[in-house]
Amino acid sequence: MFKKILIANRGEIARRVLRACRELGIETVAVYSEADADSPHLEEADERVCIGGPKSEESYLDMTAILQAAEQTEAQAIHPGYGFLSENALFAELCGQMKITFIGPPPRVIRLMGDKATARRTMAEAGLPLIPGSEGVVADEREGLEIARRIELPVLLKATAGGGGKGIRVCRDEASLARAFGEASLEAQKAFGDPGLYIERLIEGGRHVEFQFIADAFGEVVHLGERECSVQRDHQKLLEEAPSPAVDVATRREMGEKVRRAVAAIGYVGAGTMEFLRDRDGRLYFLEINTRLQVEHPVTELVTGLDLVKEQIRIAANARLSWKQEQIRLSGHAIECRINAEDPSAGFRPSPGLVTRFEPPSEVVGARVRVDTHVRSGYRIPVYYDSLLCKLIVAADDREKARLAMIDALERFQIEGIHTTIPAHLEVLRDSGFAAGDYDTGLVGRLLEREGTPKEPPPER
């Protein structure tokens, strides 16, 4: 096992990894930017190293600064969390060159799955169903139009190196495709340094379902069931639940085995997520593999009773998987709300500033409550990073009890000084379609159109 791990991230995920290391008896190094010098999570690290200025490219994306911090503190491994450098194959390679363990998949696998067009071809060869679309990167607008005519409009233009909802355009006719091609390509270039796009048929009324898996270096793979991630705004997830109300036991078993075989075929090591789009007829189509820990991993932990972060670390230290597939059991239901510093009444505009009061609920009758956060009263949210304040997770014996418990927990959550997305979450949870488990990725958009943007009182300052 490692003696010391450097956490190359910030906020709630840095604190989550710190907790796992502490429970494993591993010393920790927390790196931080100048903007995060007062972040509460730093108090929990054994060592702290400032790696640069407030902008991400000056700090959390600066590979040289992070590797120098690891070298000077004699850290044996680096945990990248999610975002930033977590899916950067070059960074993983540089770690290896410096004899530092990158807690994630091999660089080859990151690179293979990081290009969405290549990932589609690879998973098709492994036997997974694909949404009809281009076989690789689309050369230009003219080729895009030819493909769209073949697979039928409407279609989605998607950045091949994409993520976070960037570089995506819905095209319902040829004119909109012609307009959107250049825009999406430019956005992809700015966001990912790669202008490449691919095309796939747009599935209306689809649901976003993902399977969590983890693999060791000895060829063993287990899946931990699926999560439903269809509550989204502009392709950004707001709420997740496990298991999915749309997936039955037989489908879970069948697709889980396909996921295991596909993951083993590419030599994957570590934790990852395979994402699918479910159509109205119940068919699941491969979308992509996220070669990292997901923001929503807590819902899987609560329904399985397993710790994904500690298992990530164990596997990176060359241990065998702690579990066999037949030992994995799903129990109860869990829901996670990503509470962001955003103003729902103003189009979800970011709301940085001083958090004057932060009092999360500690318990709800009939449910377990978990809060993953780095925030406390008196914390000032920087303007430079993601607006995620915390993740509120509840688990109960069944989905309805979990839904009602989450409503109760959100109503008890006291956050003042800034706007938050809590009103939007309550709107979703009280929706009759969501309550029945009958919803898709268009739910949030329909709620906003039907009832207007959820309102929130002005923040107390």
Image: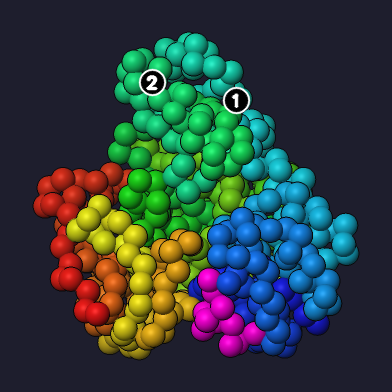
Q: Identify the amino acid type marked 1.
A: Val
Q: Which residue is mark 2?
A: 179
Query: Which stretch is magenta?
Result: 35-45
| Between marks 2 and 1 in the image, the one whose residue lies nearer the viewer | 2
Above or below, 128 against 308 in this view is above
Please give the name of the residue rendered at 40% of the width and 51% of the height, measured from the top-left corner: 236
Considering the whole magenta stretch, tell me its main secondary structure.
helix
Q: Identify the amino acid type marked 2.
A: Arg
Lower position in the chain sequence, tag 2 or tag 1: 1
Magenta region includes residue 207: no
- Visible residue check, residue 227: yes
Please give the name of the residue rendered at 15% of the width and 63% of the height, measured from the top-left corner: 455
The x, y position of residue 184, in whole percent, is 46, 31
Determine which of the numbered discs, if any, sits on residue 137 in the image.
1
Apparent side of residue 357 relative to residue 80 in the rendered image (left or right): left
Q: Nearer the viewer, residue 70 or 260?
A: 70
Determine the image quadrant of residue 84.
Answer: bottom right
The x, y position of residue 24, in whole percent, is 70, 84
